[in-house]
Image: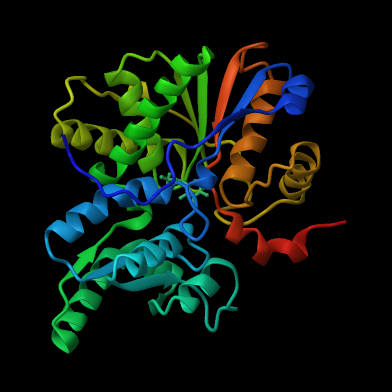
Amino acid sequence: MIQKISLANLPTRIDKLERLSEDWGINLFIKRDDQTGSELSGNKIRKLEYLLKHAIDNNYDTLITTGGIQSNHCRATAVAATMLGLKCELLLRSGDNPKIEGNYFIDRLLGAGINFCNADEYRDSRDEIMNKIGERLFKERGSKCFIIPEGASNALGSLGYYEAMSEISEQEKLTGTVFDTVVVAVGSGGTYSGLCTANKELSLGKRVLGFAVASDREYFTNKIHNINVEAGEIAGLKSVFTEDDIEINDKYIGIGYALSRPEELAFIRHIASREALILDPVYTGKAMYGLYNEIKEGKVPCGSNVLFIHTGGLFGLFPKQDQFVF
Ligand SMILES: *Cc1c(COP(=O)(O)O)cnc(C)c1O
């Protein structure tokens, strides 16, 4: 069995959303992975528990990773590094002089090393740039740098969500409620991958529905399939993973990654006022808006048990507050 360190508050709660269940004609439950911690909140911690075990065991002293200026993953990595006495260096996709707010504010508060790149560099050469940063830090201070890919979405990281799916299965046994469908936002694919591999390997028979928030269905199906296969190899799983195991819906990306339409923000307001459930604009807000619309179109059976995984992202809501209309 592959080992991890313990950083997250686990298991996370599962609660029924009574009012939305009634409004939408399904039994809607929420798994509070936004409550894996406060500074360390969200889904990235489960993946980092595995990656950081590897980093510590191999005597790395610096973590390098990358994401958008408001990346939850970069913030979680900076927090985890600091907690463990490691250094952290971030490559952030940004324009000039980004406002110090939200996740980026936390990155700065913690004293993470900050490097910027533009959108083209991010798309074409982020891994190369991270390698160069690692070489520079080795020259400057002899650092041994561990490079974590975007979103910590590789085979090792995905095991965090394999474990989360086992946790869900245990919670089903305790409560007697079995979930027909598990719903999650998909940004870099590692979370979906772990849920999907566990669903197959443990024969849980669930529909695992992912709502893309960035690239299209084809891109994610391919990327997730690759992670599934590699995770199967490193963890010694017996299942054969195919692209047919993967269900990605890309109809609710809206106007683009981290960009919000007025109807999405109005929906976040509605959910907050109905259930005191606060979704983020980049991931969970879009995914739940997608779920709501799919239910309306009859694509999720009436009366079925649906578990939505709240993957966090609260810090990313505050930089958007001026876009909300009250
Ligand atoms: C990163 C992130 C996701 C998506 O997870 P991936 O593993 O990158 O697909 C979903 N929600 C939040 C809040 C995130 O930060």
Q: Is residue 61 left or right of residue 298?
A: left
Instruction: Report whether residue 256 is seen.
Output: yes
Q: How many marks?
A: 0
Instruction: Report whether residue 221 is seen.
Output: no
Q: Is residue 93 left or right of residue 150?
A: right
Query: Residue drawn at (37%, 45%), measured in percent from left and top?
Result: 46
Please determine whether, in this image, residue 306 is positioned above or below residue 121.
Answer: above
Please determine whether, in this image, residue 62 is positioned above or below residue 283.
Answer: below
Q: Quadrant of residue 292?
A: top right
User: Which quadrant of the figure contains the N terminus?
Assistant: top left
User: Which quadrant of the figure contains the C terminus?
Assistant: bottom right
Please determine whether, in this image, residue 268 is positioned above or below residue 251.
Answer: below
Query: Residue drawn at (58%, 78%), measured in percent from left and top?
Result: 100
Q: Residue furthest right?
A: 326
* Coloring scheme used: rainbow
- Residue 136 percent coordinates (x, y): 20, 83
- Residue 179 percent coordinates (x, y): 52, 17
Q: Is residue 313 left or right of residue 200?
A: right
- Residue 308 percent coordinates (x, y): 56, 31
- Residue 195 percent coordinates (x, y): 38, 30
Front residue (pair 266, 129): 266
Front residue (pair 288, 142): 142
